[in-house]
Amino acid sequence: MSDPACEAKPACEAKPACEAKPAYEAKPASPEPRFEPKIVAFLCNWCTYTGADLAGTSRIQYPPNVRIIRLMCSGSVDPTYVLKPLLDGADGVLIGGCHPGDCHYQSGNYKARRRTIALKEILRGAGIDETRVWLRWISASEGQRFADTVTEMTEFLREKGPNPMRTEWAV
Amino acid sequence: MEQEPRIGVYVCHCGVNIAAAVDVEHVARAAAELPGVVVARDNTYMCSDPGQALIKQDIREHGLNRVVVASCSPRMHERTFRAAAQQEGVNPYQVEMANIREQCSWVHRDKSRATEKAGLLIASAVAKAARLEPLEQREVDVTPGVVIIGGGIAGMTVALDVADTGLPAYLVEREESLGGRVAELNRTFPSLQPVSDLLQPLIARVQDHPNVTVFLTSCVSQVDGYIGNFEVEISGYGETGTPAGGDPASKSGTPRAGLSVGSIIVATGYDVFDPQRTPELGYRDYPNVITSLEMEERLIQGDLTVDGRRPERVAFVKCVGSRDARLGNPHCSRVCCMYTAKQARLVREMLPEAEVTVFYIDVRAFSKGGEEFYDETRSQGVRYRRANVSEIYRKRSAPGVDAGLAPRAGAAPVLLVAEDTLLGQPIEFEADLVVLAVGMEPRKNAGVIQKLLKLPRSADGFFLEAHPKLRPVDTAMDGIFLAGCCQGPKDIPDTVAQAKAAASSALIPLIRGSVPVESASAVVNGELCAGCAMCADVCPYDAAALDDLWGTSRINPVLCKGCGACAVTCPSSAIHLQHFTAEQVLAQVDALVE
């Protein structure tokens, strides 16, 4: 919905008489503007979301490319939750759940695993690069592992380049 | 009743915790322009009384029906803000949080990118808030009773406090007897009271208490459930005396008991640093180099002789395995300064003619009466020398030392090589007996408890408290609390204080009789349901079942725990998980991916 032609305005409707704001929308002036992938992460409340909090309390730094949505269980990740960001132009989707055997709801993570395998098959069939979807088990005590996963995924997607679906679906 | 969303957005500076990495005023201004937002403000501390008063005032003045707080993790303060909103008549489930501290300002240093991300997270929270529906708060009854893992002084203190309220306490100890590490000690500091004087009555009280059940040579092998209703399985701890480590499943015997309790307390204690990891100090190479814990045993037995000889020069080396990042232990063990002073004093008493020298990096005598005890120790003739000991060895020329006689050379003195850090000079010091003041480490098998209870650990390997200052005995898991050295090194008074704190925290839900639980259950739309019963197949709690009369699915909201598996499985999209509906989640996706 944001149009590159309307300069440095936030994506939402800007109200008039809004004082001069710092130009954070503008990309930082780095010599070689790197591609910054957008990652949408669906994290289960009990393990990976808490693990991400632990990365915070431990001040473990990782790239800001990940945007987290909290769900109660990785087993509640609907295939549309993964498809929609990919079709909207996100470069990757991370699903984070408890380690096998540790699910707060007994078996939600196994359901997530089966569903993700099937979904990847469908993505492949539809010509969408299924390696953009990552399913990882990260427990509440693995703040470092969360940070490492985000770093690794950001590097992976940076190498891979922007999600082509974005341009193909834009109207 | 459909309400037009009227959203208030509150962005917290958290002092500088958020403001240092995120331009808070900017994101608050940007939030004001999001759809449905009536008012957006920033405040130094949203969780403070003035911060909450601000929210309440806005709810009254602007007629807000939804509140978005952008601050710390919802795990930290969601309850606070829900309660504040509820007081002004806003349904607590129409409060949404944007986690811009733990998941943004604390993990990103680039201010412009952190600000951009914070703005997106707030937009996502606003998008969800606009679609939030009011829900009824639910409570479940709790099972009275507490399982305490570890029968040391911390665990026993907790058990007695719980039992004295009349509730059952289950004390699980893997060894054959209660007492833990304290049972290995001789006297306390600074009172020099024999440890057995305080430990034996405590053990006796625990064993005689009608409300305490003690499980010896046992371990916790399985934990299910949640705050208020944990199911804990107790198994035998295999052969006694097996070294720590490994997983309990392989060592534990048949299950001994299945317990239903409301709270769990972890009081698993610590391990002592093994100085074989500092081979330069000669531990195990020379029989007259011993650890402080071995010294405690000798003091209990009243025998300080080395190979039958009374030592004339006794040296203590402090900070062995503590304050040493090289060994992975950058932390201070907090007790070594005081127990070394105590041992040095006792050696002076038992061997008045011996010369007693303490080699230290710093002296930290902070406990109550500690500094006075340290002063008294020095005035009694114990010499303190500020020096880093780099090596302990025995000269080849020492009497009785050669290849063939080495095992008999126990009494031969050793040489401490050190740098006197006040003089700035290397020194050598001969001693007949060297005591290494070893520090505390996390239990080697702490990972077992970590996995079993899903507890986070801090960088030093000890269990992590929920908040370093305000929630020092709570953990990230509701209903599970920490007591004693499993959370970090402590002396006996601090351990007992923490144990008593853990006991009262653990008792809160038990005495209250109920705990609030997730109201967000799954709901079936009967109009869409085709009656395939796939939801009943996937439900781990048997909450979904077909209605006898209508043939469509019904979900029992008391049994439903809100995992959402059925909602994803339903081929007719007839089920939605309240508070995490597809509409809400996809709106969040829209806000995050412009």
Image (cartoon, grey):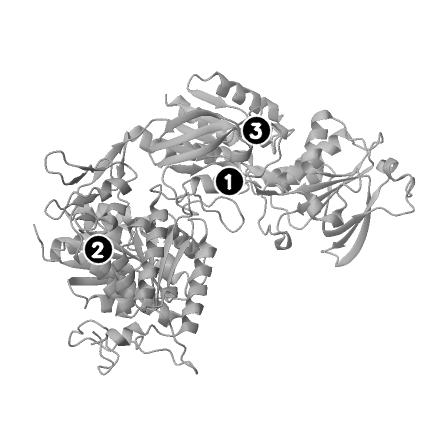
- The answer to which of A132 and B9 lies nearer the viewer is A132
Viewed as shown, does residue B87 lie left or right of A97? left
Tell me which residue sits at (19%, 75%) in the image.
Answer: A18
What mark, if any, has residue B448 been given in the picture?
1
Q: What element carries label 2?
A: helix
Residue B168 found in image quarter: top left
Above-or-below relation of B281 to B29: above
Residue placed under numbered mark 3 in the picture: B238
Co-location on one chain, circles 3 and 1: yes
- The answer to which of B75 and A85 lies nearer the viewer is A85
- Image mark 1: chain: B
Residue B543 visible from this viewpoint: yes
Q: Label 1 to label 2, Cα distance in Å?
A: 37 Å
Residue placed under numbered mark 2 in the picture: B582
- Image mark 3: chain: B
- The answer to which of B388 and B167 lies nearer the viewer is B167
Viewed as shown, does residue B218 lie left or right of B240? left
**Sequence-wise first label, 1 or 2:** 1
Using a 10 Å C-alpha cutoff, classify the residue at mark 2 as few (fewer than 14 neighbours), some (14 to 19) or many (20 or more): many
Amino acid type, residue under disc 1 in the picture: Val
Amino acid type, residue under disc 3 in the picture: Gly
Residue depth check, mark 1 versus mark 2: number of the one nearer the observer? 2
Residue B328: percent from the left, percent from the top?
60, 52
**Sequence-wise first label, 3 or 1:** 3
Q: Label 3 to label 1, Cα distance in Å?
A: 15 Å
Residue B381: percent from the left, percent from the top?
74, 38
Residue A85: percent from the left, percent from the top?
28, 65
Amino acid type, residue under disc 2 in the picture: Ala
Residue depth check, mark 3 versus mark 1: number of the one nearer the observer? 3
